[in-house]
Structures are given as structure tokens and as C-alpha cells.
């Protein structure tokens, strides 16, 4: 018996499953994940940008480009870890088949995170390339953008997978978008700096994970690096540590009830 | 011989509801053990505990010498499972489904590939190998699930209604594979609603209902004990007339049972029964004399009411 019983092998096979499924529809998947942020960028960046001109000292379109990059990564991960994961658990028995074969819930979750890190990296990087083509990348520091993409891919996976594991139907998944994702998208510094918002609102925004990702990505793309970024990095790492274990218990209960 | 599965006072509760009610049974190495019972009897629930997919509420359950509990990988690695639901991945092809399952068991790429090929050929799915699972017929899906379960070269094979939805040809194919595996020393736990299948394959079986064991034994033994070796079947029998038949042979060793509107008279010694009925001029012009089957035992034990 040459069976590979290393823990990481199991997690990698979960990744492999997602990859095999994804290569069959990647074209439409890429289109789906770019349609919206690209529309936002073009319409708001160049359309609204014609009137707003500058934001926090940079041209409006240059300001929102990196923000939308972060949003692209967040959405790519969140859609997959809500709707797709919900189906894997409730419609297709994919997790059930995995757990019947000798995989464990932590291995499944780790495999999913790895996959989302890949998605975040892929979709974020393609968006970065689009920014480059549009002349919106201003610094060699942008080469480091893949790093925060990988980490934020993992960061946004945990809460979304928890929602998927707890949801009783598809409708409940929409709540997550309406109540969490969309407000974050609108307020976390993607379109305007938060400096002029009331203090309380600012405090709340600082608690949102997207805010810190936007700061880091924007700094790298524009080449405006400053010491405060270390705080953003610390927040992101903290959130990864805090969120990653979130879905494990619920998934265990759902799969071995 | 060593016991591969041992259940003692095994109980499974869902809230206040007790799905498995304190059952005892054991499965010896190399045997094919049948777990029979009507819908909702508690078969799949018992199987979920054996597969380490559900917590044992109370009692003891050892599988392959280890205590069964969710997450016991030592047990899981030695199991092959055909669950009642297919749980095939609709986004993948048949071949990918089967191969990937082998990889979940820790197989390398090449090994999984060649083993999957072997099993697809055996289950006559090779032509369908590169089709998406969602385009398969029900019976083909079931065969794919069986192929998948065999990927890990199990020591204990768990089959929860493996042949539901299969055509007769495919069923014979699966029976052959099961016998082959038995010869290789694989222990098999089988549930099925096809009594002829259980009769053919099971060395030993239990009939459960409402989470309790009603009877146990070999198929032949159960037939002898519960009904008798032969059956006189009188179709579309008038209830009053049937009753007079039963009354007239009261003194003989006969078990009578209604299956729908057919009257069944069971006995291990049928000639005197027929002679007696002839004497009384009660023998109907149309009747069917046959060997009693496990199906008769099942219906006798679990009653004729439909479940749930
Ligand atoms: N997760 C669950 N929560 C609550 N009740 C359950 C659960 N799973 C099964 N049951 C109940 O336990 C009982 C036994 O179910 P089980 O699936 O074991 O039956 P079965 O013998 O496999 O029946 P079938 O032949 O229909 O497959 C049923 O009454 C069922 O409703
Ligand atoms: Mg069942």
C-alpha cells in the first residue's frame, strides 16, 4: 500500500476537485467575475471621474481602480464560498462523499481555503492586468499585489463558508450579501476616503476586513507606501486567524449529525 | 473467526426520537451480512454509525477492532461505502469522480488512474467514462457509485441498497462482483429491498423494524423457522373462503399469511395439507405451489402495512 496519508494530501485533493470542476466552465466564470467590477471601473472611473476629477489627491479613476481590484477578489471568493459551497453541502453531497472517504472537516475546509486563495489570486491578478492596460498602475510595488490577494482570499472564505453551512436555503445567502458584502463594498474606502465620515462610522469601517485590503492594495498600485500600512497588515492577519476556524464546528455538525 | 462488526445495545437518537433501539449483532470476517427491514426501519442510520459518519448515542460499536465514532480514520480508510444517496459530483465526469475518490483514499495519480479504468471496465461504464455525471441514467449512476466505493480496496464493503434502480443485467453484474470480492476475503454489509438478492448473497442476516431486531439467521434457516419450506399460493382469494381453508387445516403444521388479497399457506410438509384440502373439497381449482422465499419471511415478520 503506497497510500499517501499526509494531512496536506487530503486538503490538496479538495483543491483538485474544485480545479477539475472549474476548468470546465472557466471562460464564463472569468466573464462573470469581471463584468461587474469592470463596468464599475469604466462607468464610475471615467464617467463620474470626468466630474469628480480627483479623490484624496489622485485622479478618481486611479483612486477606485485598486479598490475595485480588492472587491473583485472579495466577490470571487464570497460567491464561491456561499452559493457553490451551499450546493456542495446541501444539493450534491460533495462534502458528504469526501467525509465518507477518509477526509476530515478541517482538511475539507483547508482545501476550500486553498482554492479560494487561488481564485482571489487569479481574478485579482487579471484585474491588475486590466488596470495596467488602462494605465492605472503607477508603481513597481504593484508586483507585490498577489501577496495580499492570497491572504485575503483565505480571510473572506471563513465567514462565507460559515454562512453557507448555516443557511437553510439560497435566500438566506442573499442576506449575507445585502447585510455584509454590499455595505462593505460601498463604505470601505473603495470609492472615497473615510476621513470625513463621522467618527463612529469610521470606527465601524475600521473593523471591516475589506477596508484594510483596499488600503494595502491601493498603496501598492499607486506606490504610496506609509508606516500605517503595517496596521492594515496586522488587521488582515488577525482576521485570518480569527475567521479561519469559524465554519469547522458547524460543518462537523452538519456532516456527522 | 474474528468479528468485523460488533454492535451491543446500539442506540441512535435524534432528539427524542430513537431511530435505532438497542440492537445487537455481529458480522464475521469474510461474510456477507444482510441488514433487512422496511422503509424507516433504521438500516441507513445503523450504517451511518458503522461508517463513522454519526455519533453512537449509546451502546457499543466496534468496526474492524476499533471503536466507531465520527472521524475515526483508521476505520474509514478500510471501508468502501455505497451510500443510499449517490453523492456523485455533477461537475465532474464519471472517470474523474471515481479517480478522485481513490485520491481521497491517498492513492497516487497513476494508481488511481489504472484502478479506476479497471473498475469502469468491470462495471461496463468505460464508454461513459468521459461523460458528465448529470447525463447518466439512474442505473449508470448507481454503478458509478459502486465503482467509486471499490477504489480504496476496502476490507469491509458497506452497500446501502446498491442495486436500487439497476436493470436485471446490471444487477447480475453486481452480484458477480460481490461474490468475487467475498472470495477475496472482503467482508460485506448489505441492505436491500430485493429479497431474492438477500437470499442469494447473504450468509447471515437480521430483519429489523422500528429500530429493533425481529429475527436473525441464515436465509434458509429463517425460511424454515418463520414460515416453512413450501408455499401454497391462492391468488384473489375470497376472505371468507380463505378463512374456511385455514380452519380446515388447523391441526397441521401450517402458517397462513395474507399478502394483499392472496392467501399463502406455508408448510415444510405440504403433501398432507393438500390431501386434507382435497378431502374437505376445499382445494381451489387454481393454486400455485412453490418454494417459500425470504420475501415471505419478510412480509410475515414486518406485516403488510405500508411504511410512512
Ligand atoms: N437526521 C435525522 N434526523 C431525524 N430523524 C432521522 C434522521 N435520519 C433518519 N431519521 C429517522 O430515523 C428513522 C430511520 O431512518 P433510516 O434512514 O435509518 O431508515 P432505513 O431503514 O434506511 O429506511 P429506507 O429503507 O427507507 O432507506 C426514520 O424514521 C427517519 O425518519
Ligand atoms: Mg436507508
Image (spheres, coloured by chain):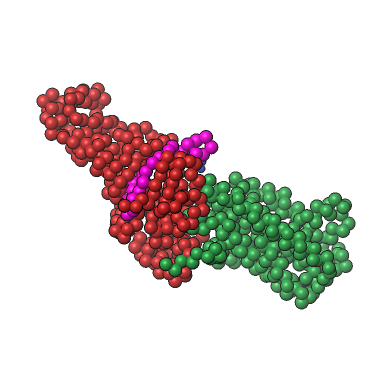
Front position in the image: B94 or A242: A242
Q: Colour of chain A?
A: green
- Across and down, in percent, residue A39 comes to 72, 63
Quadrant for residue A88, please give it.
bottom right
Q: Magenta segment range?
A: B13-35
Please give the name of the residue rendered at 60% of the width and 46% of the height, measured from the top-left corner.
Answer: A169
State whether residue A177 appears in this view. yes
Front position in the image: A84 or A39: A84
Please give the name of the residue rendered at 39% of the width and 47% of the height, measured from the top-left corner.
Answer: B6
Please, which residue is most extreme toward the bottom here? A140
- Across and down, in percent, residue A112 comes to 59, 60
Quadrant for residue B253, please give it.
top left
Which chain wears red? B
Q: How many marks?
A: 0
- Across and down, in percent, residue A8 comes to 56, 65
Front position in the image: A249 or B137: A249
Dominant secondary structure, magenta:
strand
- Across and down, in percent, residue B259 comes to 29, 33
Quadrant for residue B260, please give it.
top left
Residue B40 horizontal side relative to residue A206, left or right: left
Residue B202 horizontal side relative to residue A115, left or right: left
Q: Is residue A61 above or below residue A89?
A: below
Q: Is residue A248 above or below residue B23?
A: below
- B21 in the magenta segment: yes
Front position in the image: A222 or A133: A222
Please give the name of the residue rendered at 20% of the width and 40% of the height, measured from the top-left corner.
Answer: B291
State whether residue B135 appears in this view. no
Amino acid at each position: 500500500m503506497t497510500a499517501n496519508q499526509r494531512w496536506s494530501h487530503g486538503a490538496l485533493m479538495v483543491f483538485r476537485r474544485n480545479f477539475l470542476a472549474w476548468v470546465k466552465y472557466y471562460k464564463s466564470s472569468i466573464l462573470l467575475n469581471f463584468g461587474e467590477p469592470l463596468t464599475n471601473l469604466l462607468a464610475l472611473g471615467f464617467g463620474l471621474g470626468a466630474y469628480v476629477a480627483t479623490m484624496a489627491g489622485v485622479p478618481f479613476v486611479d483612486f477606485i481602480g485598486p479598490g475595485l481590484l480588492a472587491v473583485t477578489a472579495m466577490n470571487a471568493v464570497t460567491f464561491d464560498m456561499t452559493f457553490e459551497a451551499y450546493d456542495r453541502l446541501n444539493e450534491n453531497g460533495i462534502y458528504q462523499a469526501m467525509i465518507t472517504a477518509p477526509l476530515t472537516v478541517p482538511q475539507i475546509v483547508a482545501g476550500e481555503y486553498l482554492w479560494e486563495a487561488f481564485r482571489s489570486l487569479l481574478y485579482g491578478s487579471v484585474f491588475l492586468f486590466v488596470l495596467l492596460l488602462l494605465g492605472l498602475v503607477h508603481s513597481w510595488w504593484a508586483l507585490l499585489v498577489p501577496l495580499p490577494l492570497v491572504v485575503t482570499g483565505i480571510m473572506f472564505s471563513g465567514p462565507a463558508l460559515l454562512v453557507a453551512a448555516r443557511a437553510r436555503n439560497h435566500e438566506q445567502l442573499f442576506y449575507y450579501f445585502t447585510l455584509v458584502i454590499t455595505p462593505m463594498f460601498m463604505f470601505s474606502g473603495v470609492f472615497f476616503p473615510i476621513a470625513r465620515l463621522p467618527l463612529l462610522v469610521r470606527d465601524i469601517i475600521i473593523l471591516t476586513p475589506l477596508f484594510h485590503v483596499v488600503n494595502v492594495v491601493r498603496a501598492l498600485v499607486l506606490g504610496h507606501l506609509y508606516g500605517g500600512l503595517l496596521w492594515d497588515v496586522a488587521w488582515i492577519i488577525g482576521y485570518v486567524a480569527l475567521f479561519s476556524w469559524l465554519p469547522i464546528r458547524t460543518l462537523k455538525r452538519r456532516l456527522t449529525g | 473467526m474474528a468479528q468485523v462488526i460488533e454492535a451491543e445495545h446500539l442506540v441512535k437518537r435524534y432528539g427524542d426520537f430513537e431511530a435505532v433501539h438497542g440492537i445487537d449483532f455481529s458480522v464475521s470476517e469474510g461474510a456477507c451480512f444482510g441488514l433487512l427491514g422496511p422503509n424507516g426501519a433504521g438500516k441507513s442510520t445503523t450504517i451511518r454509525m458503522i461508517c463513522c459518519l454519526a455519533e453512537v448515542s449509546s451502546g457499543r460499536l466496534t468496526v474492524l477492532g476499533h471503536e466507531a465514532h465520527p472521524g475515526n480514520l483508521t476505520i474509514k480508510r478500510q471501508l468502501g461505502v455505497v451510500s443510499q444517496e449517490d453523492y456523485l459530483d455533477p461537475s465532474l465526469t464519471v472517470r474523474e469522480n471515481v479517480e478522485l475518490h481513490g485520491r481521497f483514499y491517498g492513492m497516487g495519480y497513476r494508481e488511481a488512474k489504472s484502478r479506476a479504468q479497471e473498475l469502469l471496465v468491470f462495471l461496463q461504464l468505460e464508454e461513459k467514462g468521459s461523460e458528465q455525471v448529470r447525463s447518466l441514467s439512474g442505473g449508470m449512476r448507481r454503478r458509478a457509485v459502486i465503482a467509486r466505493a471499490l477504489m480504496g480496496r476496502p476490507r469491509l464493503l458497506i452497500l446501502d441498497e446498491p442495486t436500487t434502480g439497476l436493470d436485471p443485467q446490471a444487477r447480475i453484474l453486481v452480484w458477480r462482483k460481490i461474490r468475487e470480492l467475498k472470495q477475496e476475503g472482503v467482508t460485506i454489509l448489505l441492505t436491500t429491498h430485493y429479497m431474492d438478492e438477500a437470499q442469494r448473497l447473504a450468509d447471515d442476516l437480521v430483519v429489523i423494524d422500528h429500530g429493533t431486531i425481529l429475527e436473525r439467521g441464515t436465509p434458509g434457516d429463517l425460511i424454515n423457522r418463520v414460515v416453512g419450506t413450501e408455499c401454497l399460493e391462492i391468488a384473489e382469494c375470497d376472505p371468507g373462503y380463505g378463512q374456511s381453508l385455514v380452519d380446515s387445516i388447523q391441526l397441521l403444521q401450517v402458517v397462513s399469511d395474507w399478502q394483499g388479497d392472496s392467501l399463502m399457506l406455508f408448510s415444510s410438509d405440504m403433501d398432507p395439507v393438500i390431501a386434507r384440502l382435497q378431502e374437505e373439497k376445499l382445494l381451489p381449482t387454481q393454486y400455485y405451489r412453490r418454494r417459500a422465499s425470504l420475501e415471505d419471511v419478510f412480509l410475515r415478520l414486518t406485516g403488510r402495512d405500508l411504511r410512512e
